[in-house]
Amino acid sequence: MHETTALLIELGAVILALGILGRLAGRVGFSAIPLYLLAGLAFGHGGLLPLQASEEFIATGAEIGVILLLLLLGLEYSASELVSNLKTQYPSGIVDFVLNAVPGAAAALILGWGPVAAVALAGVTWISSSGVIAKVLGDLGRLGNRETPVILGVLVIEDLAMAVYLPLLTALLAGLSLAGGSLTLLISLGTVGAVLYLALRHGRLISRAVSSDNPEMLLLVVLGLTVLVAGVAQELQVSAAVGAFLVGIALSGEVAEGAHNLLAPLRDLFAAVFFVFFGLNTDPAAIPPVLVPALILATITTLTKIGTGWYAAKRAGVRTAGRWRTGGTLVARGEFSIVIAGLAVGVEPRIGPLATAYVLILVILGPLAARWTEPLARRLTRKPAPAAPAPAAAAAVPASPDAEAASPVAEPPATEANDAAPSHT
């Protein structure tokens, strides 16, 4: 079969399967992300129907998917809101690092993998998946919720921290000198600072230059600018996702609204491809040997992420239900964890299967935690109604025909209405 023909057949089959799975998930009110991942396992190496011709195309589509997810997330907020969130949420970022990086580092040291592997596994367990969380927030209709800026604040701090962490990890893995590692770090920090400055000071000029009454021109310019900036950011040791997010932050007003409407269908298509590609790179046979340690690590860091979200939302004045939703939404790990594990495989080969199993567990559990953490917490923390007082003894109260009429009616006990029902705080 001709290579182009095979590419079209495989690609068409994958997209059709994704559409069917998405409709099935919608029918049962469930996130489609776990189904997309399972589809990737079925089509990947060691799966039921391995893909050959379209794998490279799907890999490129996956990169575009993450870029579009973060671009549209950035379009929801202005540069001033971003800076305000960073100023108020940096203590939450510190708590996030301590609670979630330490378990990964400790696990690597307990397994005897050495300090460099400990730094790598700390990053795997620390960073939540911006791509998965952006998709979940959209699927659950929570972009306008009171807790969503808190979630984004934590995610942005994590993503910006990658501008420091990834160059340092790369230097450690390569055995570079202090001077070489410092130069890479300065370049990445300078890139992030320059893009933030442009977004803050010249965002209106950028929006005006991009603006167009022609939807076709607007789509081409915004998409081209985003992919270009993401590529340059990646080349300068900054995450492509961070670059795309900052482009979204820089655009505002009618341009942001128009770009969002035009790019939303493309985002949904390529985001689905991203999750499939994640599954394609996972060999199902490599998961069982590391499943137990991965489950233990996933359980611990699920609880620490929920604790992180609770703390961050409490600092922001979000009510109890919103605190639980924040914690549950932050559980998912994804693209950054896989990138970090891929870098570290050369130093410690066993970190690859463990990180893959760990991320696969949490990328499936993440959408479920986002949906069910708050209702489950509400049930577990619901206070039982106080028992009704015992009736007075007949001998203590003289019988009277008017006694029942004169007795006061007991009022029902007060309940915490704000916590007993979901609220869009």
Image (spheres, helix red, strand yellow):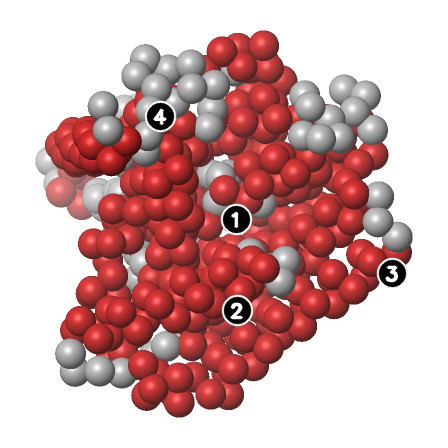
Report helix, strand or loop for mark 3. Answer: helix
Considering only order in the chain, which callout, 2 or 1, is on the residue closer to the N terminus? 2
Label 4 crowd bin: few (<14), some (14–19), many (20+), radius 10 Å: some
Residue 404 lies left or right of residue 155; in this view the side is left
Considering only order in the chain, which callout, 3 or 2, is on the residue closer to the N terminus? 2
Position above or below: 138 against 75:
above
Considering only order in the chain, which callout, 3 or 1, is on the residue closer to the N terminus? 3
Label 3 crowd bin: few (<14), some (14–19), many (20+), radius 10 Å: few
Q: Amino acid at mark 2?
A: Asn
Considering only order in the chain, which callout, 4 or 3, is on the residue closer to the N terminus? 4
Looking at the rendered image, the disc whose residue lies closer to the viewer, 4 or 2, is 4
Q: Are marks 1 and 3 in contact (CB under 8 Å)?
A: no
Q: Amino acid at mark 4?
A: Gln
Position above or below: 322 against 41:
below
User: Looking at the rendered structure, which numbered label has been put on residue 85?
Assistant: 2
Report helix, strand or loop for mark 2. Answer: helix
Q: Are marks 2 and 3 in contact (CB under 8 Å)?
A: no
Residue 415 lies left or right of residue 188; in this view the side is left
> Residue 407: x percent and y percent?
21, 43
Nearer to us in this view, 208 or 320: 208
Residue 188 lies left or right of residue 38; in this view the side is right
Residue at 21% x, 44% y: name it. 409
Report helix, strand or loop for mark 4. Answer: loop
> Residue 424: x percent and y percent?
30, 56
Nearer to us in this view, 125 or 264: 264
Q: Amino acid at mark 1?
A: Gly
Looking at the rendered image, the disc whose residue lies closer to the viewer, 3 or 4, is 4
User: Looking at the rendered structure, which numbered label has been put on residue 309?
Assistant: 1
Residue at 87% x, 60% y: name it. 179
